[in-house]
Amino acid sequence: MDKAIIVRNLRKVYEGGVVAVDDVSFEVERGEIFGFLGPNGAGKTTTINILTTLIPPTSGEAYVGGYKVGDQDDKIRKAIGLVPQELTADDELTGWENIYLQGSLYGLSRSEIRREGEELLEMVGLEEAADRLVRTYSGGMRRRLELVMGLIHKPDILFLDEPTLGLDVQTRAQLWNHIRRVRSEYDMTIFMTTHYMDEADKLCDRIAIIDHGRIKAIGTPEELKRMVEGDLVIIRTVNGSPLEVSLDGIPGLKDYTIDGSEIRVRVEEGEKATPAIIESLVSKGYRIRSVELVRPSLEQVFLTLTGRSIREEEALDTISYRVMMRRRRG
Amino acid sequence: MSGALWALTEREIKKWYRRRIAIVFTFITPLMWLALFGKSFNLLNLFRAPDDLPPDIVRTVQEVIDSIIIRAFGTTDYFTYVATGMFTVFILFTSMFSGMSLIFDRRLGFLNRLLVSPVKRETIYLSRVLATVIRSILQFTGLFIIAVALGINLGPGVGPIHILLTYLNLALVAYIFSSIFISMMLRVTEHDTAISVANLLNLPLMFASNSIFPEEQMPSWLKTVALLNPISHSNEVVRTLLVMGSLEIPMTSLAYLLVLALVSTVMGLYLSRRYLR
């Protein structure tokens, strides 16, 4: 079996009848970064917990590194590494103490751990803090330590559960670089979950969009983005519903919808169409409150597939909608 | 995978000695029993021959009283009796909370880190037991020094070998208690549970033993409990070594403790494989 992970009709029903994972099937090639993208509670962590032998599936089967989950758990455990969502390094120990402990769980000798550890700590820029108690680390430092600990035994397959959760933009970008380097230097397969669109888009070779325990689509970021055609121009007016507007002659027009004071126009190229749309609105006496140009993005894909925005789940910045001109690049 | 066993044990020990305040607190309860109870309740002083009798009669009466007391307590100094009884109780107190770290590890997600690794579940369990034994024994040294400072009367002829055997006996007791208490916490997710279990059991286990009073004068039902209580058997061994200064350890008590250790090991290993996930 040359696939890194094979999952067939996986299902997990928790006590009390909550269906966390519902008939999920997918395959992960060796050496790729495969991402599970979905909102909180979509079943991402449950899937990771099954694949890392922490919980048994209710039905279906899964193979990790060629070994069957449930039957050959010991072999799977030797082949995988997990960087969990929670920060689980022991904060009463130092960085190095955590690394030694982690390495010894995999039967590594002290000198092996020292050698690997130094290399990994240098890679993530943590060598100076490594003798300090983890309690004194910042969130970003702890994430990096978690990564080092997950990698100390050079697993064939690395599981990353929301690796940049709660980090600021710069730290996230740094961590992405580390993950990319790990993949290329150690020739590793990486299975990761995220609810950040940009993270999935920038980091993953292939993405599965998961919602309510079901996979909605699988493909490369480009393939997924091709599912939604064209750009979306969203214009809000100050004075009423723009029902009288005529959009004939707008270049590359596909269709449009009007919802209250908002008009959503789907066009081939947003930059070219936007001025013409604004002109035709203004000529009918509408005054513009805001203009938004939405590129084909995973966010839009998610919206199309699930009928809602992943951001609604996160209740993030509603303010950003009021920004006069805003571009979202996918 | 003995490297993992030692690494996990080392973690427990490191975390323990870094919490110095907590170590100080572990001495407070046994110290109260020794210094306050043991010293104030020194009831054997009450049994004194009346001194208005002729001196040779006083001596004879006192000898009779002492012989009765020695038959029951093995010493005429009640403090020494209580102190040697508290040694094992102290081991119980330090072992009762040994399941706590497991509960915290479960809650904080650290346990999952161990469970996704190839380390054997039995190793996770045994490392906690081993750490508790080491911890208890090191802490006992502190208590032993306190007892000596408070004036414990060690029997004539108590030497290094007696003390070494006392340590081994107490290590055995720590092993029994910690393996039982850790087994009980394998599936528990609330640390309140561990505290409740400990609070429920600590005083009854201490009173239903010969730690504070000999079991001879107990009603038969209580005597039965005291005789099943491993604390009583450990006390027998400790008092033989330290109070009587004898190396003739009561074999039934030792055998009883060894059987308990064996049973708790088998149970703990079975339960950890089954429930540690």
Image (spheres, coloured by chain):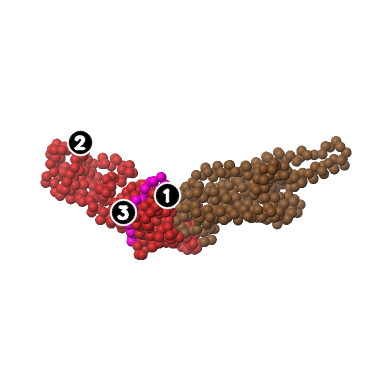
Image hue for chain A: red
Chain label for disc 2 = A
Q: Where is residue B39 in the image (x, y as percent from the top left)?
A: 70, 41
Q: Is mark 2 on a helix, strand or loop?
A: loop
Chain label for disc 3 = A
Mark 1 Cα-neighbour bin, 10 Å: few <14, some 14–19, many ≥20: some
Between residues A2 and A223, which one lies in front from this camera angle? A2
Q: Where is residue B86 in the image (x, y as percent from the top left)?
A: 66, 46
Q: Is residue A21 magenta?
A: yes
Q: In this view, does A99 lie to the left or right of B132?
A: left
* Point 78% across, 39% down: residue: B47
| Residue occupied by mark 1 | A86
User: What segment is highlighted magenta in the picture?
Assistant: A14-33
Kindly give the residue lying farthest to the bottom in the view shown. Answer: A1
Q: Quadrant of residue A73?
A: bottom left
Q: Is residue B97 left or right of residue B167?
A: left
Chain label for disc 1 = A
Between residues A286 and B267, which one lies in front from this camera angle? B267
Mark 2 Cα-neighbour bin, 10 Å: few <14, some 14–19, many ≥20: few
Q: Is mark 1 on a helix, strand or loop?
A: loop
Q: Residue A208, which numbered label?
A: 3
Mark 3 Cα-neighbour bin, 10 Å: few <14, some 14–19, many ≥20: many
Q: Can residue B241 be seen in this view?
A: yes
Nearer-N-terminus badge (1/3): 1
Q: The brown chain is which one?
A: B
Q: Is A241 above or below relative to A183?
A: above
